[in-house]
Image (spheres, rainbow, N blue to C red):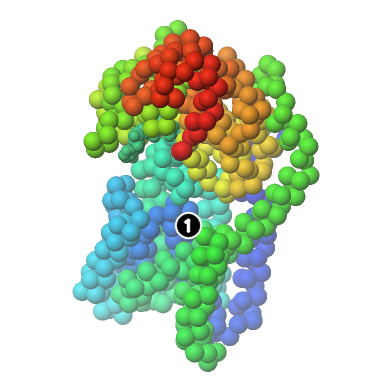
Amino acid sequence: MKSRAAKTLSDLVDPRRAVIGIALAAAACVAVPAILSPYWLYLAITSVIGAVVMQSYGVIVGRAGVMSLCQLSFAAIGAWVVMRLNLADAPGGLIVWVILGGLAAAPVGMLIGLPALRVRGVNLAVITFGAAVSTDIVLGAKQFPGTEELKTVARPAAFSTNANYFVLVVIVFTVIAFALAALDKTRLGRSWLELRHSERMAASHGISVARSKLAAFAISAFVAGVGGGLMAGQLGLVVAGNFAMGQSVTLFAIAILIGPHHPEGALMSGVFGAAMATILEKVRLPQDLGGIVFGIVPIFALRSGMSQTDFTRNRKRLAKARKQRDAAPAADRERADAGPPAERTVGAPARPIGTGPALEVTGLTVRYGPVTALDAVDLTVPAGTVVGLIGPNGAGKSTFISAVGGFLGTLPGTVRLDGAPIDRLAPQVRAARGLRRTFQTTLIAPELTQYEYLDIGAGRRLERAEADELLEFFGCPVGDLPVSIVDAGTRRLLDVAAAIAARPTVALLDEPAAGQSAAESRRLAERLARVPERYGVSVLLVEHDMELVRVACREVTVLDFGHVIATGPTEQVLRDPAVTAAYLGSSDTPDDAVASTAIVTPTG
Ligand SMILES: Nc1ncnc2c1ncn2[C@@H]1O[C@H](COP(=O)(O)OP(=O)(O)OP(=O)(O)O)[C@@H](O)[C@H]1O
């Protein structure tokens, strides 16, 4: 039987990929020094060190989607530490110094990452570029330690020759590649993927955007610092020009185009960024050719909206997924068409349902400038129920969900979850306390499989049986299909399943039936009605589909222009003339009103 540690390791690192990766690295270590002349071997070392630096872009730009233009500043810190320790003949030798260089860069990375908590996009690029400029100025005014004394960095005896140093840098690159691949499978790694697509979605899953971003800055700075340290070991002495700010920007562009968050992308970027000019010069080709390649690769990136390596990988993955889907379409259709499966026998037990209100909102007010979207709204979701929140377009329903979820900051009014006030908490803290939400527009990272997305939603690794049960209950296809191949309507259901997987006290569902056929809506209604008893989760359901509301909800609250105009048992409220008037702008008969609600189409 596999030990727990071995199982965890095989969960984090795909054994097949590990074997291929190690075999390729070993082959390179044997073949490259044997085949290449000393000059080309030197360039190969430069390229692999460049690839290590590009791995740092792979973390911050490729994974977390943050624009950082100062990665070479972190590399400079790594190099500086190595040269300082070398000058002092510090114990440990180059390998230890390189690690210390990375560790010294990490807190600086976090410091520079602090503004990223408030700004993003171009503004953040400007801030990080400012850091690169400052590093340039400091390094320009102050030489690296050992430069005056001409004390070159001493390599360990085992790696003193360039052939052996090549082996060292390949080992470092490979170890970082495996470590990052393993990190991708952890909650932190997945949180970066969510951040890249939507910070709001990440927060709704209880992920701290601040912590994830700072971790991305720290880890990417560490990796860049290691790259800088290796550079010092290769060159013996480094100068400010090795870490020029312009180079940081060029490497950023290369990162966007090639995608160094994949090992092959990091290697290609390393060759391109670190050695292209020299290679062209050596083979007597015009330097402009580099510019031409630089001009062609963006065509791929722009055409596909993704980096070159993402594009290639995605194409392969989609082809495989389509085959997989086509192999089992009948089973999936049956599953979607079937009624809710009977008693649940797997997975975490249902949350015990309390006796008081699960969610109690009083006096909630939201103003967008002159528009009062919610005006002192009171709403209660009794424990163990599904409550509907309906109203015409623009009534304030989505605003209510965002406000209760904490996405609009601290507001007038109170929000209590299971009796405890949560109105001053950040969205991810509310989510962690047991308040989950879905969005009208789902932005699930398409790279994830459905299983992986459920894990993110649940905040833990679900057992296969538990994930399968959830997917089956909500009529989603088999779990290892990538989200990119799942249609928009099914993604909404997946979003609901991910919210329920966390076993929150309350799930706020924003129009989960949008994009579903009438029959699918009906089945969803039956399923939602059973959620409280099956999973112990109370639900607030925003919907335009009145048939779904009728079937799923025990109580309904109606909003109109930010005011509650009716609240109570579903049938009674749906027959209320004031509700009819709000929907139709006249006092038609209640039944007409309900029938006519199908005409009120969602805009979100
Ligand atoms: N970010 C915003 N800035 C300014 N006004 C906004 C903003 N978001 C919503 N509003 C306004 O607040 C009011 C309520 O909008 P909200 O989206 O909450 O309504 P809704 O009931 O969810 O509508 P729908 O059913 O169309 O989704 C509308 O008048 C809308 O125009």
**SS at mark 1?**
helix
Q: Is residue 413 left or right of residue 278?
A: left
Q: Position of residue 284 (x, y in %)?
A: 53, 92
Residue at 31 percent across and 17 percent down: it is: 362
Give the residue at the far left of this rendering.
141
Compared with 182, 240 (above or below) is below
Compared with 132, 523 (above or below) is above
Residues 245 and 474: in front is: 474
Residue at 66 percent across and 28 percent down: it is: 519
Q: Position of residue 186 (x, y in %)?
A: 52, 43
Give the residue at the far bottom of this rendering.
284
Compared with 573, 200 (above or below) is below
Give the residue at the far top of this rendering.
355
Residue at 57 percent across and 14 percent down: it is: 533
The residue at which mark 1 appears reads as 62
Q: Quadrant of residue 521?
A: top right
Residue at 66 percent across and 54 percent down: it is: 317
